[in-house]
Amino acid sequence: MSTALTPPADAVPPVRHPDAPAPGELLGSHYAHCFGCGGEQPHGLHLEARAGEGVAVTAEFTVTADHQGAPGLAHGGVLATALDETLGALGWLLRVIAVTGRLETDFVAPVPVGAVLHLEARVTAVHGRKIYSSATGRIGGPDGPVAVRADALFIEVKVDHFIDNGRPEEIQAVMADPDQVRRARAFEVNP
C-alpha cells in the first residue's frame, strides 16, 4: 500500500450511519447511466451492491464478452472499475457522497469471461473528508481465491461537485428526478 493510502495516525475507525441500509439490503444504482451500476448501460457492469455488516458492502459482477481484454479474459480496466464501483458503494453506509481520489489495484489472477467476480469492500478509516477503504474480488464463490484487490482513498464532496462539473444536459435530467435529488440531498445532512 502506498503512503497516500495509509491513514494518518489520528484517523478514526469508520462508523455506520444510523440511517444506513440494513445488512443484506440492495443498494441500487446511484445513476441509471453509470457504467458500473447503471441498468441503462447496455455494455456496463450492471454491478449490484448490498449492504454488509459494519461499514462493508458486497457485490457480484458477471464478466461477459463485452468486458474482455485478452481473448476470453476480463480487461484489467474493467476489473478496476468493478472494484472502484464496489468501493464507491460504501458511501451509502456512511451517508456521504464521495469520489475516488486514488485507487491502487493488484491483479492477482486472470478472470475468465463467464466468471462471476464476488466483491467485498470495507472502510478502514476516516480522516476528515478522506475515506480509506479496501476491496477484494474473488472467483469461484465469496470464499474463492482472490483474483483482484484494491486499496482506495475516497474524498467526501457535496452534490455541487457534480452540478458544477457535469455535462449540463445530464445534470438537468437528474435534477428533474425528485427521487435523485432527495437521495443526494439526504446524504448531505450531517448526522
Image (cartoon, rainbow, N blue to C red):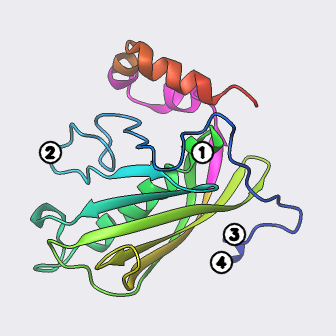
Q: Which residues are magenta?
A: 154-171
User: What amino acid type should be assigned to the residue bearing mark 4?
Assistant: Ser
Q: CA distance from mark 1 to mark 2?
A: 28 Å
| Of pointers 1 and 2, the one earlier in the residue sequence | 2
Q: CA distance from mark 3 to mark 4?
A: 5 Å
Q: CA distance from mark 3 to mark 1?
A: 23 Å
Nearest to the eye among marks 1 and 2: give it.
1
Q: Do the residues bearing badges 3 and 4 touch, measured as CB atoms within 8 Å?
A: yes
Q: Is residue 95 left or right of residue 103?
A: right
- Residue 156 picture quarter: top right
Q: Is residue 83 visible?
A: yes
Residue 101 spot, x, y in % from top left: 59, 56
Q: Is residue 170 found inside the magenta-colored segment of the image?
A: yes
User: What amino acid type should be assigned to the residue bearing mark 2?
Assistant: Pro
Residue 42 spot, x, y in % from top left: 14, 45
Nearest to the eye among marks 2 and 3: give it.
2
| Of pointers 3 and 1, the one earlier in the residue sequence | 3
| Residue in the picture at 29% in, 41% down | 38
10 Å crowding of disc 2: few (<14), some (14-19), many (20+) = few
Nearest to the eye among marks 4 and 2: give it.
2
| Residue in the picture at 46% in, 50% down | 24
When the figure is inspected, residue 97 is found, relative to residue 23, above or below; the finding is above
Check disc 4 and report the residue beneath it: 2
Looking at the image, which is closer to me, 92 or 128? 92
In the image, which disc is placed on residue 93? 1
Check disc 3 and report the residue beneath it: 4
| Residue in the picture at 45% in, 59% down | 58
| Of pointers 4 and 1, the one earlier in the residue sequence | 4
Check disc 2 and report the residue beneath it: 42
